[in-house]
Image (cartoon, grey):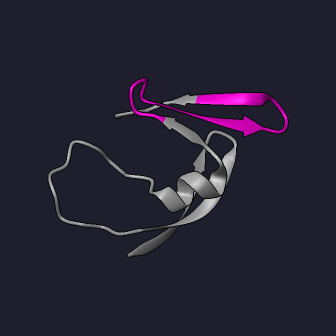
Amino acid sequence: MILLDVQIGSVKRTTIFIVTPSKANFNVLLGREWIHGVGVVPSTVHQKIFFWNDDEGLEMLDADQK
């Protein structure tokens, strides 16, 4: 397990990650605790997350596989 500061868009939150030796086709999974804690709405169909930014209004971020 490792504790890291994660910034996605304008949201920054300290998050616990569990590192596993696997050959997955993704880099990281953000769990329910992070999703609900930050208040985002994930869309697996569109591969995006949506959340409210007090400065700019609705913020939308695309999934990045790089």
Extreme residue toward the bottom, this view: 1
* Identity of the residue drawn at 30% across and 67% down: 19
* Identity of the residue drawn at 18% across and 64% down: 21
How far across and how far down the image is residue 10, in percent? 69, 42
Q: Is residue 17 above or below residue 31?
A: below
Between 31 and 4, the one lying in front of the other is: 31
* Identity of the residue drawn at 48% across and 57% down: 32
Q: Main secondary structure of the magenta part?
A: strand
Magenta-tinted stretch: 43-60
**In the picture, which quadrant includes the C terminus?**
top left
**In the picture, which quadrant includes the N terminus?**
bottom left
How far across and how far down the image is residue 56, in percent? 81, 29
> Would you say 5 lies left or right of 63 here?
right
How far across and how far down the image is residue 61, in percent? 56, 30
Q: Is residue 20 magenta?
A: no
Q: Is residue 62 above or below residue 34?
A: above
